[in-house]
Each structure stands twice: as C-alpha cells, then as structure tokens.
Image (cartoon, rainbow, N blue to C red):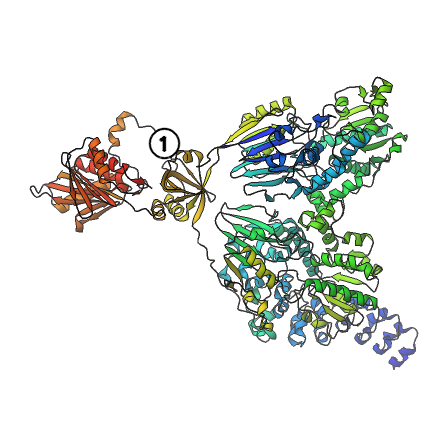
Amino acid sequence: MLFYVVICCPMLSYVILCSMLFCVVLCYSLLPYVILCCPMLFCVVLCCPMLSYVVLCCPMLSYVVLCCSVLSYVVLCCSMLFYVVLCYSVLFCVVLCCPMLFYVVLCCPVLFYVVLCCSVLSYVVLCYSMLSYVVLCCPMLSCVVLCCPMLFCVVLCCPMLFPVLTLTPPPQRELMDLSTIDVILISNYHCMMALPYITEHSGFTGAVYATEPTLQIGRLLMEELVNHMERVPKAQTATCWKNKEIQRLLPGPLKDVAEVWAWKRCYTIQEVNSALSKVQLVGYSQKVELFGAVQVSPLSSGYSLGSSNWIIQSHYEKVSYMSGSSLLTTHPQPMDQSSLKNSDILILTGLTQMPTANPDGMLGEFCSNLAMTIRAGGNVLVPCYSSGVIYDLLECLYQFIDSANLGSTPFYFISPIANSSLEFSQIFAEWLCHNKQSKVYLPEPPFPHAELIQTNKLKHYPSIHGDFSSEFRQPCVVFTGHPSLRFGDVVHFMELWGRSSLNTIIFTEPDFSYLDALAPYQPLAMKCVYCPIDTRLNFHQVSKLLKEIQPLHVVCPEQYTQPPPAQSHRSDLMLELPAPPLPYRRCSVLSLPFRRRYERIHLLPELAKSLVPSEVKPGVSVATVSGMLQSKDNKHTLMSVPRPPPAAPTKKRKRVAEEPPELLAPKPLLSGAVPLDGFLATLHKHGVSEVKVEETADGHILHLQAEDALIQMEAHATHIVCDNNEPMRTTLRDLVLRFLQKL
Amino acid sequence: RENFCSSITAEPAMIDVGRSCILVSIGGKNIMLDCGMHMGFNDDRRFPDFSYITQNGRLTEFLDCVIISHFHLDHCGALPYMSEMVGYDGPIYMTHPTKAICPILLEDFRKITVDKKGETNFFTSQMIKDCMKKVVPLNLHQTVQVDEELEIKAYYAGHVLGAAMVQIKVGSESVVYTGDYNMTPDRHLGAAWIDKCRPDLLISESTYATTIRDSKRCRERDFLKKVHETVERGGKVLIPVFALGRAQELCILLETFWERMNLKAPIYFSTGMTEKANHYYKLFITWTNQKIRKTFVQRNMFEFKHIKPFDRSYADNPGPMVVFATPGMLHAGQSLQIFKKWAGNEKNMVIMPGYCVQGTIGHKILNGQRKLELEGRSTVEKFFYLKSLYLEVKLQVEYMSFSAHADAKGIMQLIRMAEPRNMLLVHGEAVKMEFLKGKIEQEFNCYMPANGETTTVTTNPNVPVDISLNLLKREMSLGGTLPDPKKPRTMHGTLIMKENSLRLVSPEQAMKELGLSEHHLRFTCRVQLQDPHSDADTLHRIYMHLKSVLKGYTTQHLPDSMSVMVESIVVKVSSSTEDPNTKVLLLSWSYQDEDLGSFLSTLLKKGLPSVLC
C-alpha cells in the first residue's frame, strides 16, 4: 500500500525507495534525488521541471527525455530510444543522438521529417525540391554534386547552384575524374561550400580562384556549418538502410536513389582549412593567365560581397560565365555588364528562385509583419544565412526601427560566426556599392549595423548558451540559422515559440520551401510569413540584359527553357531568346559551338625587321615569313633562323656536294603569270637569242635551240625541260621567278 | 606600316626625396606618376614646375592620366595645385585608402601653411574637395583600362596604408613605378610584392640606396631601450611622426612594451587625428599585414590602452612622458612647438623615426646643428626682433630609421621579382643613387636622371601576329615534342597585312584568301646512265643507291611504273632505243622541291657506284 502513503508523506524521497513510486513523485519538489533510485521513473519525469540533471543518471531515460527541453544532453545516455520516438512530434532532436536511428526510421510514419535533422542526412536531401541548398549543409555532399544535372557548371564554379527537381539515375563514376580539373573558379560564397570535397582526397591538384570577400565569408559559412555539425554526435551505426534490400522498402523518393553508399560525411575544420589554403585571391577585372593559353578575370556580379561572373578568354574567343547576378542596388558593388559584351558563349545560371516575388515588396512586408508581431507582444524569428541578405535586412531595420517605434525591442543575431560576419562586412569597402564606399572616406563604417551594435539595439551571440541565456529578453527579434530549420540554433527557437500564436516566423531565404521546412514542427500555432528575398536576375531582366550584351550563343540549364512544372502556363517564367539557347542537362556533355581559327604568335623584332612586304592588292601586302617556331607554356614566338655555321675546313669541302640538302620545309608557293614578251626580252638580255616560239592550245612553247632547252608556258604553269645543263637550268629558273610572286 | 621600334621616356620633375613627380611617355601616352610637394621650401619651389608641360597647351590635353602611389605629401602634395590651379580635368588614380587619407593630410598641411603662416597663393579647402572628385579609386591587381590602349594595374607596396606600385602598359610595352615601397613586413603592414611582369622599365625609389639596414628586431630593441632610459631618468621623449603610417607601428610597439614592463609614464598622441587615423586602419584592415588581418575580429590592434590624446598644456607638465607629435620633420605644427619647449633640457630626447628633408629643422638637428635659427611668425615680428631668434638645442637627438623604404637589398629583391629590362632610379640622393646604380649596372641598363632631365629608353617589342591554328598545329606536330637545338626547324608562312591586322597563314591558304591562283613551275631533266643491267635491275640499283644516300627521306620503289619516288620527285627509267646499256632517267620535280631535285640530277649524272650497299 505504499503508493497511497507516499502521497502524504513529507519525507518522500527516502520512502519511495521501497515503493511503487511513480504517481507520487508528481507532488514533490525534491524529485531528482528520488528518481535516481526509482525503477519506474518515466511517467513522472514528464512533469518534472528539473529534469535535466536527473535524466543523466537514469537508466530508463529514453521515455522521459522526449519531453524535456534540455533534451540533447540526456539523450546521449539513453539506449531505448526508438519506440518512444514514434509518439513524439519533436522527434528529431532525439534522433540525432540515438544510435538506433535506423530502426526507428523504418517504423516511423513521420520518418521523413525526422530524418531531416539527423546526421544520416541523406534522406532529407532527397526529399526536398530545393535540394541544392540543403545539400550544402549536408555531409553527403559530394555524391550529390555528382548527381546534379548541372554537373558541368558545378565543376566550373558552383556545385550547388540549382534546385534538383527530380531524381534521376546517378552518373557514371567515370564521367569525370576530379583530379583532371585544372582550375576552379568560384563565383560567390554560397557556391563554394562543396570545395573540400573536390580539393581533398579527390586527387585534385589544380588552382582555385576567388575574390577575397568570397574566401573570407565562405570560410565563415563553412566554419558555421562544421560547428553546427559537430554539435551533433555522429551516428556510426546507421548504415544498414543503405542496403539495397532495405532501401527498397523505404518511402518516397528515397527508395529510388542509387549509390547511396557513395554519400559522405560533412568535412572537418581541418579539411576546410586545407581546402581554403589552395584558394588564390583575385580582384575584379584582374587578368589571370592560365597556362599561357587563356586569361580569366572575375567581374562584379552585384549579388553578394565579392560575388563574381567570370570571363574566360583567349585572344580570339571569349566565354562568359554568369552565375548569381543582380541588377538591384543592394550593398555589393554593382554588376559589371559592359565587360560581358562580345562573348562568343555565355553560360547563364543562377537566376532567381522566386521569379514572381519582388524583393522590394518583400522587404516592406518583412518590416510590417515584424512590427505588427512585436506590437502585439510576440517574438519574431528570422531563419537566415549569416551573411548576405541579413546585411540588407539590418540596414532596412535601421531605418525602420524609429519610425515603427521599435527602439526598445532587442534584436539578436545568433550564430557561431555572427560577430565575424558583422565585422568582416565592414572591411571590404572596395567591394561595396558607391554609397557605402564613400562612407569609409569619412571615416565611418559602411554598414549601419555598426551603429545598431553600438547603441545595443543589435546584439550578437555565438550560440544560445552562455551570455545569451541570461541577457535574453522578450519580445524580441532573432536572426539565426540554419534557414532549412533542420539544425543550428533556430531549432530551439522553433521549440520555444512554436506553440504561441503571438509569435511569427518570417522566411526570407528563397532556397527552401517554407512548408517543407515547417513540416516536422506541425501542428504549429506560430504565424508564418513567407517573404523570400532573392535579388538575382529574373527572366525579364535577363532578356533585357542579353539584348544589351549580345552573346553569340547562350548556354543554360534545361529548366530555364521551359516554364516551371507547377506553373506550366506561365510562359513569362522561361528564357525567351531570339536564338534558342543551348540547354544542358545532367550528365550530358555539351560541345560548345566554337571555331578556333587563330592563335597569337609573336615575331621577334629582328625577324620582323627582315621581312620584305610586297603589295599584292591595294591595301593588302604579303610577306613570306620563314622562322623558327618556339612554343613554351602555350606561348609561341617566331625567331629568325640562325645562320648556318661557317663552312667546314677545305678538306671536307669536296664532300659537301654529296651531302643531301637538309630536309627543310618546301619553297614558297608561286602565283601570277609569266608574260611572253617580257620573258623573251629578259631572255634576250641574258644572251639567249635563238628562241623559237610555238603557239599551243593553252599557251606557248619556247624552244631555246642553242641551249637545247624547252620552256612550256601556260597561264598557271611553266615547265622547264633542260637536260645536262644545270647552270642553264638555274638561270632559266631565276628568270621565270622574276615574274612570279612568292607566297 | 609597322612600328617595330618605340621608346619610353621618363622625365623626373624632381629627383631628391623632396618630392616625386615623374612624367612618363610610353607608346604615345603621357602619364604623370605622383605629384608631390617639396616640404623644405616655402615658396614656389615647393611645387613641381608644370610650365615644362603647359608651355605647349593645357595639362588635360597632354596627360592621359595621373597616378598617385601613396598619401605622403611629397607624393601627392601638389595635386590640388596641379588639378585646380594649373588646371587638369583628366582621371587621377589612387587606391581607396589613399583616396580616403590624402585629402585629410592636404587639408592639415593647408591649415598650417595658410592659417598659421599666413601664406597666400595656396590651394583652398574647396580645391582639395574638387580635386578629390576627379579621383578614380584603384583596387589591388585590378586591371584598369584607362583607354583602349592604356592599362594600369596596382600592386601592394607596403610603405604606408594604401601604398601601391603601378604597372603601366601600352601594347606590349610596360613600365613599373614603385612609388615608395618596403620589402620587409613590419608591425602593421606587409611586404611589397609584384609578379614577374618583365617591364621594359622599372622606376624605383632609392631613398635608402646605400643602406643595408640591420635587423628590424635590433632597431626596435634599440628604440625601446632609448625611450625607456629617458623615461626612467625623468626625461620627456618627443617623437615627431606623420599622423598615419609609422606612427601606428611605433604605437603598437610602445603599447606592447608598456604592457609588458608595466610602465606608468603617460604616452600621448598629438591632435585629434589619432582616433580618426586608427579608424582608417580598422576600415582598411585588408591593407595591413596578415597577422593583424587574422585577429582583427577578436582584437583590434589599433585600439590602444596606454596612448591618450595630447593637450597642448601637457607639454609643461612635470615628470616623464612620451609624445608622438605631427608633423614628422619638425618643420611646422605641434611637433615644432613641443620641440621648442623641450629643446633646452638635456634630460629630454627627440627621436626622429623617419627621413628629414633638407631645410627642415629635423634635417638640421640630425646633422648635429645645436643652434637653430627660427624664423619669426611674420615680418612684423622679424622687424621688432631685428635679427632672427636662436634656439639652443640641448636635448638628445636620436635618429632611428623606421622609415619603411626598401634598402639596397630590398631594391635588388624587387628587381629580381619583376625582372625589368631597364632600371631608373629616382627619389634618392644623387651620391647614394650612384652607388646603387653601379651595382645594378653589372646586370643591366640603369638610368639615373637629374631633375628635369629626360631619359629615353628604347624598347624592342615583339610584333604580335595572328597565326592560323591549322598552320600552328601542323608545325607543332612536325616539330615533335622536344625542340632539337642542333637541327632547328624552319616554319614557312605568309604574313598578310591588311588594314590593321597581321595574319600569318600557310601559303596555300593565303593564296586562297587573296584569290590568287597558283603558278606551277616544274622542271624536267633527262640523265643518261651507263648501266649494263635490265631496266628492272637498274631501277632497283637506283632505288638502293638513293636510299643509302638520302637518309631521312622517304624513297619509294615503284616497279610497276618503272620509277622511283623520292618525296614527290619522280625518277623514271627507260632504255635508250639505240643502246640497251644506256639508260635514260627522266627526273621531274616542282619548284617546291627545287633543292632536292637539283641535288638528285647532279647525283645521278655521276652514275651509280659499282658496289651498292
């Protein structure tokens, strides 16, 4: 009868040791000590505010844990996780820590969402239509890249630029050997997240080029990713699902994926450092020689700090690679359009993902929703990347705060790289738009968020632990990542605020479907506002731009040549050009329509001086060039042929005649005609007077009777027949040559 | 039709460290490099003499662009004078930090000269602003196309924040101008760097042409020791500096020393410039050295704890102190005022961390002058005193070469980096430059023009030509992978010169393009040979003979047509009708095989050897 007793007993804890504990515990504040000794802990724990300490010591942890907000620490100790998981909507945090993930997943109807948050990331990626950005954060990146239909561009620059809308069979591994790549050109910091997978362990030995802001901010984003990943314990064992037999049983698109074994883990910080040490810095419009054969130079693309389009050109051919570019006036330096002119080929990618959303309107909506929520006493959560649009959001808020009376509302920016990102943005004046540049001359920081920080309106923290937890005040606005809502500190805020309809989550990053991102958190009371801000070019802007720069050929992903599948009637959501673009798709090798005809060669000055030009037509001169070709590092020079060494001593001289002539290139070609009268006069001058001229159908035959020679002359041919008289023959030859042009 | 030969001329308007202003003509373009002012003069001599150019018209028409290497006044001080008072509206190029800092220094200097000294005929604040509007910012390594032909590219020079070296290129000719540069990284800046651009001319400063300075660490230790000793015995230390540049390096040095030694004596930095200056350093952190760049998020090296702003009244405070005061050459301003106050006490010390121009007080005291003539504030004052004031200098005077210029070793290092064909030394003292010139001339041409003297460097540029890819590929495949120096291959082609294009194509293609028809020239030659064999045997014997003589040629035996072919030359054999032992060989070749044909006919006339191998 212990059970009832305990309820009334003030000294609960000691008693319980002998009792059927669990109903009782609910009434006691000294819970934790008790629990340690209790075999039936779990129901109780659910109600306990001091859960976390307890749980660590409890052998039956798993049931309990699910209800606990300090979940992660606890879970590490729990061995029986999986049944429970099925019953809980906040599953995913648990899963991350659970060594038995695999089984759970198989049995769990909410599998899909759950998996998204786990270290066995692969499920996630496959289920999302906006694959690319997810993949960026994914430890299995590299194979994704290989499966990406835009493979070619990836290699050129951006591994993840485009959404993968459908699952298609994986490429042959032989399609490309990464070690044969010579150069990687990086267009912007979002496009370099897969770099370690290429530069490390693939045999890659080439060069990587990027601008300084791209490198620095790219490094920050990679560090952030690694940091987020390292917070999550690694599940070593969950690989069985990759077996064909089991994979076949998996839901959704998962079962159709091939080569899951090739998927990889997230890189480490060492790999990031090693990969980035291979990056060589370039400035806008800097001309970088590659192997002497081509010149590459980055141009401002106006999309983000240091973002670039690339020109790859030789003396005669020009290929432009246009990735994420923007014509809007945001913080980066404006796009350099004029340098893209006269391209033979323009590779066009990275158009806006939100062709229907106007960034300016979205920004207004963002502000008004934010203000409305705060005024109503709610909190605002903005899942976003730690660099990029956030600078513009902060600038917009800087102007908006006072007019909207938000002066006392705290703004928090939480990310392991929050401080670095804000600081770095201030030191790249050269890469900013003109307005911001001129601020530096005053000297003032180019971005107003410096002032927000100074006046304590904006505070940044590396994570929710530490200072933040003590300084945190509500209502507030929180900027934090990751925008996929699958990892990073944003997850905790979803947990914290998701159940109140006062709060609002505002999505600004266009890379994820907000419905998919929210799915595992449903049911959700929190308001959701979708204001995707994608400043990249839309189809209308591209058409206008292309009219201006007039490339001979345009190469673009297949997706741009037809309207999106969901809006097949919207013919304005596709690329319409006077000449149809060359579409490329996954695994297809596209040969570009080039006709290379010329190459640059340098004539050394002394050879150039020795040339004897002769005018063949008005304004056109020709000269025969004979020189020695020297090709080094793809650079060609032509120099004079060195004079032959002086004749050998007389002894050997006799033999000289017997030496066959050097095997040299043939004599020049001849052109022109030999006029009969002129030739006869010349012959006469040289003492050949006895010439009998015979008319033929095509010309004349000259009999040189004294010399026993015969010259057959036609409009385009001359034939000299001369036996046994070599000096005579050479004389005749030279006389004929006088009338002809040598080429 | 072609300009195979051209030249570059350089005209340094002023040769000594006083100021830099060089005019370069290259490929028909005129570029002014730096536009400095001489700090030692107070009259018209301080500005370059632009009448050299303006006698032939306006500056704007003459100059294609002006490039400023860094913000020191001896490199940019005359800029507003040139652009606003003489008149120049073309582009002026400078880096971002230079563009930011230069107007401030100009304004400072203008205030000292105009407001304090009461001089007229000097540029105004508005002129400085107008002048800066003409500035186009230049990024490192960015290739800026000034016009169709002229391009410039900036490299990091390390001398002060934003200092740059510039490469100027017209066609295949190029000049590199170094401005002032520094080849050893210091506490806040990195070392100068340039790629192997092989310019036709390298114009290098040579301030420290003869010096090979001792190691940086020694100099720093020496400096700290002297400061420490003076402070210990209660003396005051005056360090005249320019607000930006050296000052920041010395501040970092003293700051860390004070921290380490736990010293209490105050350090001051004159005028409100400090904070602003440090702010520039923070915003342009990408221009500082790697170490500072790496740690700037955690710790800003330019936020000093021990160094406080100076107030004029502090100069009379008792007890030790260290004061950084501007300007650096003791020619005016606060540093001069403090110097006058402290000069009488032998406990005090002045440390000159940089170069001093002739005529400045800094230069005088460094040369050991202990009695200084001070000019009066105005003529009225002079009138009252009737004679000038004399100042007794009792304090210790120390010179520490912290000035971030390349020394002789550094200059040679840069030469090795860039591999120029010619060298021009400027911005140094003639005697010192002579020494370095001798050293450099062991390797190549070196010029050292006097002020106003024009140096002409003749270049010998290659002629760029478009070669048809077919011709090039054919030639390269024939040439094999490795060139044989003993047997050079000769390539033949036809250069077509049409309008402004030069194209090298194969003769066949040229003929086709120009619409010319080929004229075939053939030779036929009959050779009689005594050979008592059947025709077939003779043919075979000829084949064997030719094959043994003509090694390396393709020789074919064609018994069906009773002929032998060597390359494209046909040798046909038939018996004479009269004598079966006399064979008639018919040789036929085209003009293109003339050498070989001629050789063959001569060879066969000699008959066949009796023994064939």
Please, what secondary structure does the residue beneath circle 1 have?
loop
Q: Is residue A374 left or right of residue A580?
A: right
Residue at position x 85%, y 17% in the image: B386
Q: Position of residue A213 (x, y in %)?
A: 66, 50
In the displayed structure, A628 sits above or below A38; it is above
Q: Quadrant of residue B165?
A: top right
Q: Position of residue A69 (x, y in %)?
A: 79, 68
In the displayed structure, B8 sits above or below A97; it is above
Q: Is residue A366 left or right of residue A195?
A: right
In the displayed structure, A205 sits above or below A516; it is above
Q: Position of residue A222 (x, y in %)?
A: 66, 56
- Observer-nearest of B189 and B423: B423
Q: Quadrant of residue A576?
A: bottom right
- Observer-nearest of A708 and A69: A708
Q: Residues within 10 Å of mark 1 (few under 14, many from 20)?
A: few
- Observer-nearest of B108 and B58: B58
Q: Position of residue A386 (x, y in %)?
A: 71, 58
Q: Which residue is mark 1?
A: A643
Split into 4 quadrants, where in the image is the N terminus of chain A? bottom right
Q: Quadrant of residue B434?
A: top right
